[in-house]
Amino acid sequence: MDKIPVGILGATGMVGQRFIQLLENHPWFEITEIAASERSAKRRYENVMVSRWKLETPIPEKIRKMVLKECQPNLDCKLVFSALDSSVAGPIEENFAKAGYIVSSNSKNHRMDDDVPLLIPEVNSEHLDSIVYQKKKNDSKGFIVTNPNCSTIGLVLGIAPLHKRYGIDRIIVTTMQALSGAGYPGVASMDIIDNVIPFISGEEEKVETEPLKILGDYKNGKFHFADIKISASCNRVNVKDGHLEAVSLSLIEKASIDDLVSTLKNFNPLNGLNLPFSPTKPIVVLDEKDRPQPRFDRERDKGMVCTIGRIRRCPILDYKFYILTHNTIRGAAGAAILNAEYLKIKGFLEN
Ligand SMILES: NC(=O)c1ccc[n+]([C@@H]2O[C@H](COP(=O)([O-])OP(=O)(O)OC[C@H]3O[C@@H](n4cnc5c(N)ncnc54)[C@H](OP(=O)(O)O)[C@@H]3O)[C@@H](O)[C@H]2O)c1
């Protein structure tokens, strides 16, 4: 099979690097273009990335010699993955979609648009119906699909089977978010060593609103948001990768703890599709009393798993537990790749 040529917008950043690493041997996609700001454009990737490549594996040989371009819609590819800074992502992604490219984006800018899917393929694939309206509005074959914020995705993947089966009406979530979530150079070392920072700009608003779109319906050309109240408190902690979240929730239809655990363990809507980035099971439930922990659990099944542990009764709501997801893989680049794989298998990349 000929591989589909893809470009990376924002290829120099934390998430852009992850795209390059994760796509190195992808069976369906091949990176043919890399782009970033005009500060980096026209330079070889290996020269721009001196002291900036922060992953444990080396820069892939083919990418080293590639020359970065500006983020203009004249790239030689069909699909672009966007890891652009949110200060610039909005108009750049629109330009690409209007010029006929398919954009799989990590940025917040278009997540809540009324014709853009905020997609987790295991949870809300029917939201892809909105693409028809987007294409019509843009008068283009191109379109944008987004993945959720890095804390939202873990929360929603972990609670979606419970919401589908029992209904959820209230959630209280406290996040402990890794440093890589702040990009590079991110938080100053003098601010985070020996410390927790109880504020991440704009994060609580995203965690309180994005799940409502994802867990809602798309019917008659409109998104109908889920009726759930969410209260989020977001913290930056001294961990490199992996967002841990303490979640308490109340169910509309009551369930025993055994039922709840088996609902989580049996959730596997993509089973049989054989998508390269789909984990064997999207949710893994641990029995150990002191897990999940970022250092030990974030890499499970290519970093694409939502790991849940310490499921127990909550004396105020119904149940409480911890959720862990790898923020730059399942929470960013890996999520956008899985979205693109899902688009391919459903025929959205053919035109
Ligand atoms: N880090 C995470 O865990 C995470 C998770 C989910 C979503 N996200 C989202 O993903 C996006 C990227 O995050 P990040 O952490 O990778 O950020 P980052 O490390 O700061 O990288 C930002 C990228 O944007 C490019 N850029 C900046 N200004 C530009 C311009 N005017 N024109 C074109 N390109 C420009 C940069 O290129 P230069 O190097 O040339 O400046 C760089 O490649 C953000 O929207 C973020 O909110 C991040």
Image (spheres, helix red, strand yellow):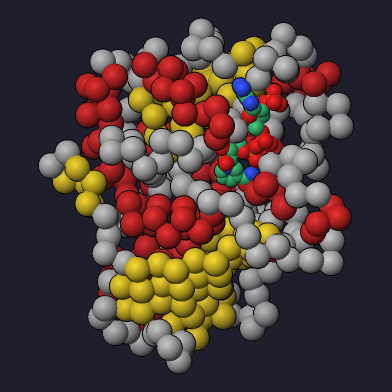
Q: In the rendered view, would you say 132 is above or below 256?
A: above
- Residue 38 drawn at (x, y percent): 67, 14
Specify the farthest residue to the bottom.
Answer: 315
Residue 293: percent from left, percent from top: 68, 69
Could you tell me which residue is drawn at 75 percent across and 54 percent down? 240
Work out whether residue 293 or residue 87 is closer to the camera in this orientation and state it.
Answer: 87
- Asked if residue 298 can be seen in this view, the reply is no
Residue in the foreground of this view, choosing between 127 and 91: 91
- Most extreme residue toward the left is 220
- Residue drawn at point x = 73 percent, y = 66 percent: 196
Q: Is residue 135 left or right of residue 304?
A: left
In percent of the image, x 48 and y 34: which residue is there?
105
Res. 193 visible in picture: yes
Task: Left or right? Give the position of 278 relative to 176.
Answer: left
Q: In which quadrant will I find the C terminus? A: top left
Q: Where is residue 284 in the image (x, y as percent from the top left)?
A: 53, 66
Q: Where is residue 320 in the image (x, y as percent from the top left)?
A: 48, 80
Q: Is residue 205 above or below residue 84?
A: below
Residue drawn at x 23%, y 28% as measured from the top left: 132
Q: 311 left or right of 236?
A: left
Q: Determine the quadrant in which ligand 1 lies.
A: top right
Q: Up-down: is 143 above or below 284?
A: above
Note whether 317 is above or below 232 in the view shown: below
Number of numbered discs overlaid on the protein picture = 0
